[in-house]
Amino acid sequence: MKAIILAAWEGSRLRPITNTTPKPLIKIAWKPIIEHNLENIYNKVDEIIIVVKYLKEKIINYFWDNFKWTKITYHTQSWEKGTAWALFWLEYIKDDVLILNWDTIFDKNDLNNIINYSWYAVLVKEVENPEKYGIFEISSDLIIKKIIEKPKDYIWNLANLWIYKFSHKIFEYIKNVPLSPRLEYELTDALNEFAKNFPLKAIKSKWDFIDVWYPWDILKANKYFLDKLEKSQIKWQIEENVVIKWNIILEEWAILKSWTYIEWNCYIWKNTSIWPNIYLRWTTCIWNNCKIWANNEIKNSSIWDNTNIAHLSYIWDSIIWNNVNIWWWFLSANLRHDEKNIKVPIKWILTDTWLKKLWVIIWDNVKTWAKAYSMPGRVIENNSLIMPWEMIK
């Protein structure tokens, strides 16, 4: 069996993160989104085929031609005309195929259930609002009849999770898919034709899965994995008088200096320095080559590569991307006084995060001078320069 991972699209709801980082390579806890799934399937398939397009060189350069000795090949999607078009030129495959979307991190138990099923299958999940999903109409023995996108009338509550196990015959149906009303070639239309000719089982998901659609989903996903950390992994240096209340991962060449206090599970990547008198808490991830200077508090945040945070700053419930330089005394509110949900502009639309607490989202190459301030839920765009005493409203 071969695995096909659809990873061609840019993830526009995650802009401006995806201006420079393809969504499959966005790190969640200690590895990129796509790698979480690869870890769970690589030794169960003969080959992994990754469909790429947007920033494809970064994905190719990250994995090259194998993942733990399982062969990887790349297929470049020529133009964006839907999920069936992404698979249009793979008809040379003569094996069973496992098809996964790159939007979601799946539990290994659910992946095993569909991989080990003796015939062909689709992973589904019971949902409370089926009108928002692709919903399967099924028989009494969970054999799929067809899928209907966002049905207006109730037909069932089993939603499509975008993991499929097909025979190679699926490519024959893909070749004959017509344009949908959205002017795209839809894989679900090919699925409906496949289901007319082959028994296609609906396998119910029994485990958690993680969608990363918006920037703040990164914080939720980090928390999901760090909450499961049962034992510390200390690979480098901890000085005297450091207090670690829960569990941490400290990677090679990272250092915790004296009087650091860590509360709850946290992750610190390679070459990162945590200076004295740092209060680090609540599922924070700090990546490569960062320097957190003395007398800072950081809570529930994701801080990416090559970022410096100077003295006397408070970083709460925040996402800070690559090559950011935060000068001393950078402050923000992470909670509205009226206690309403925080809204963030996504694709020029003010989007409800459904969160009560969200501080700031800072993208690549931002510099803030001393004593800058921010209102909750603000986005600082790439290459911005924030002046002293400036308030980001």
Image (cartoon, grey):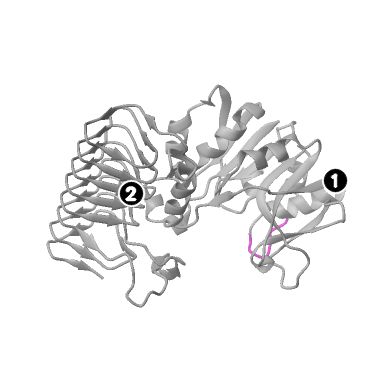
Please, what is the dominant secondary structure of the magenta stretch?
loop
**Disc ID at residue 281:** 2
Image quadrant containing the C terminus: bottom left
> In which image quadrant can residue 114 be found?
top right
Q: How many marks?
A: 2
Q: Residue at x 32, y 75 (%)?
A: 337
The reply to whether residue 177 is in sight is no
Q: Position of residue 377 (x, y in %)?
A: 34, 65
The reply to whether residue 158 is in sight is yes
Q: Nearer the viewer, residue 38 or 126?
A: 126
Q: Nearer the viewer, residue 109 or 305?
A: 109
- Image side of residue 104 versus residue 332, left or right: right
Amino acid under label 1? Pro
Q: Which residue is mark 1?
A: 199
Q: Position of residue 176 (x, y in %)?
A: 76, 50
Label 2 or label 1, whichever comes before in sequence order:
1
Amino acid under label 2? Arg
Q: Position of residue 248 (x, y in %)?
A: 38, 38
Relative to 115, does residue 18 appear above or below in the rendering? below
**Disc ID at residue 94:** none
Q: Position of residue 57 (x, y in %)?
A: 43, 37
> In which image quadrant can residue 41 be found?
top right
Point out the frontmost of discs 2 and 1.
2
Q: Residue at x 49, y 48 (%)?
A: 224
- Image side of residue 29 versus residue 132, left or right: left
Q: Residue at x 68, y 49 (%)?
A: 205
The boundaries of the magenta stretch are 177-183
Relative to 24, does residue 137 appear above or below in the rendering? below
Q: Nearer the viewer, residue 265 or 340?
A: 265
How far apart in space, not on screen, are marks 2 and 1 (Cα)?
50 Å
Q: Nearer the viewer, residue 89 or 116?
A: 116
> In which image quadrant can residue 115 be found?
top right
